[in-house]
Image: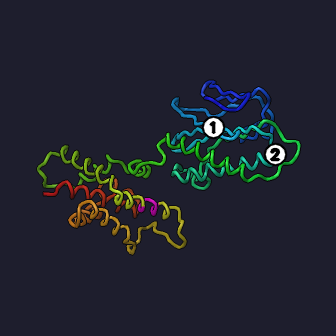
Amino acid sequence: MEINMNGIKTYEKNNGLIIESEVPLYILANRENYDFKYATKFDNHYYNTPDLERIVVQRNGIVIISSVEKIQNKFFTNISVLLDVELDNLTLMNIFRTVTETISTTSWDTDAIGKDKLDNELGNFYNTIFIACKSKSDVPLPFDISLFYEIKELVDEALRKSLNALGYPRNIIKYMEDIGVTLENMEDAAMELVVGVDEDEKIIREKFRKQLLHSLEDINVISYLVAAIRLEEDYEHYRIREVNVDDDPAYLYMDEIMGMAIANQIAGTKAIFNFKLYDEKKPGILSVLGPSVDDIIGGLIAGCMSKIFEP
């Protein structure tokens, strides 16, 4: 890993990255013994998976090293910021705050948020952040907002590259998998209501899978799915005041309208009839999904099944 900063080198040791300087660096980090302390080296960016990619972005005497792992549905984000200048304690704290806020906003922007409550409230909670400068300034420094904006831009750039290596933002299939909906369990749900058909089950499954993948390329289908999943998430976290649909009230019918709409988008009016069957029976995965998502996935399945049985 090449670092364009005089007197600083990096090298791997065990499963971490050592950042070492010829002269002591002045450091602030959320790790023990790194609260405004001098050190000639520090370690960060440990990995549990050997193919972890460490991203380096550098400009104007600022070096950002970023790495992210997803372990047990939690995002572990490591950021190291190296600055080739003298800084005072207040500036270091403001840089630390800038990095923390950028991790949160970039994670939300790319939808790289786990289901942990702390993740949902704070962006990604499991972060290790190091801010290291050449030395401590002997005098208080004037507030320089351009410095914080530049650090924010560089951290955002590096972090997006790290998250992209993990597959974020996700495609629609991965997006659905995060709520427990897979190609396999949609296929199983689709087959539960197949009756009176002479065609071999394996062939029907193959046709359904092919049609499903084709339908998931349609921006309108994708838009319906994302809208329903987002709405479900808002309901789940009570983000809309005075709205509670925990008991799936009978007067809530917009979800069924969306289900019919996505079915119609794929296979026309006849698919709406099939949607009603899947909506009533709720086979397989449909029986465990929330009030909005079960109908949109039911409509997707119904549309695809209707399409493959067209004369």
Residue 268 in percent (x, y) is at 23, 64
Residue at 60 percent across and 27 percent down: it is 15
- For the record, the magenta segment spans 227-232
Asked which secondary structure carries label 2, the reply is helix
Say what amino acid the circle numbered 2 marks: Asn
Which SS does the magenta portion mostly show? helix
| Residue depicted at 45% across the width and 68% down the height | 245
Front in this rendered view, residue 287 or 129: 129
Q: Looking at the image, which residue is at 32% across and 49% down?
A: 185
At which x and y percent is residue 146?
71, 52
Q: Mark 2 points at which residue?
A: 89
Q: Which mark is residue 288?
A: none
Q: How many marks?
A: 2
Quarter that holds the N terminus: top right
Which quarter shows the C terminus? bottom left
Q: Residue 65 carries which label?
A: 1
Decide: is 258 above or below 67: below
Q: In this view, does 46 lie to the left or right of 280?
A: right
Pick whichever, 36 or 152, lies toward us: 152
Q: Can residue 257 be seen in this view?
A: yes
Q: Which amino acid does label 1 sit on?
A: Ile
Verify whether residue 229 appears in magenta.
Answer: yes
Determine whether 158 is above or below 269 in the image: above
Q: Quadrant of residue 127?
A: top right
Name the residue rendered at 65%, 52% in the picture.
101
**Within 10 angstroms of label 2, few (less than 14), some, or many (20 or more) residues?**
some
Would residue 99 be seen by someone viewing this image from the given angle?
Answer: no
Q: Please say if the residues under marks 1 and 2 sit with CB atoms less than 8 Å apart.
A: no
Q: Position of residue 208 (x, y in %)?
A: 24, 50
Between the C-alphas of marks 1 and 2, the distance is 21 Å
Q: Which of marks 1 and 2 is nearer the N terminus?
A: 1
